[in-house]
Amino acid sequence: MSSIASAEAVAVVVTASDRLEVLFGELAELAGQRNAIDGRIVEIVAEIDRDGLCGVTGARSVPALVAWKLGCSSGNAHTIA
């Protein structure tokens, strides 16, 4: 009998407000991770530029290298570089 009782589904009511709170929490976490990633990308590109490593790749410029390796637009690459 206890196995039957444990198999019964319990209805849980989740309000829209509760769902939004969870989703906003996840967005905040993802935004923090994205900011950390973006910061590290800028550090790496600065090191490549500072040490003159771009020429080894055959890329015409640091922004061209960034666009190539990150698969981003030239405008975004210029912002990063």
Image (tube, grey):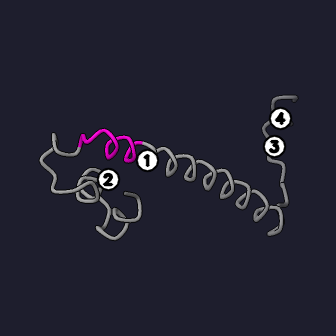
Magenta residues span: 44-53
The stretch drawn in magenta includes residue 52:
yes
Determine whether label 3 and label 4 are within 8 Å by CB: yes
Chain-order first, disc 4 or disc 2: 4
Which residue is painted at 87% across and 28% down in the image?
A: 2
Residue to which mark 3 is pinned: 8
Q: Which residue in the protein does label 1 denote?
A: 41
Q: Amino acid at mark 3?
A: Glu
Q: Which label sits in the foreground, 4 or 2?
A: 2
Question: Which tag, 2 or 3, sits closer to the chain's start?
Answer: 3
How many other residues sit within 10 Å of disc 3, few (<14), some (14-19) or many (≥20)? few
Would you place residue 13 above or below residue 4 in this image? below
Q: Residue furthest top?
A: 2
Instruction: State if disc 1 and disc 2 touch (CB < 8 Å).
Output: yes
Q: Main secondary structure of the magenta part?
A: helix
* Distance of label 1 from label 3 (alpha carbons): 51 Å
Pick the quarter of the image with the C terminus.
bottom left
Q: Nearer the viewer, residue 5 or 19?
A: 19
- Above/below status of 22 relative to 16: above
Amino acid type of the residue tagged 1 in the rendering: Ile
Q: Going 72% across and 61% down the picture, which residue do you hit?
A: 24
Foreground label between 2 and 3: 2
Location of residue 45 in the rendering, given as x and y in whole percent from the top left corner = 37, 47
Q: Which amino acid does the dot numbered 2 rest on?
A: Leu
- In what element is the residue under mark 1? helix
- Disc 2 on helix, strand or loop? helix
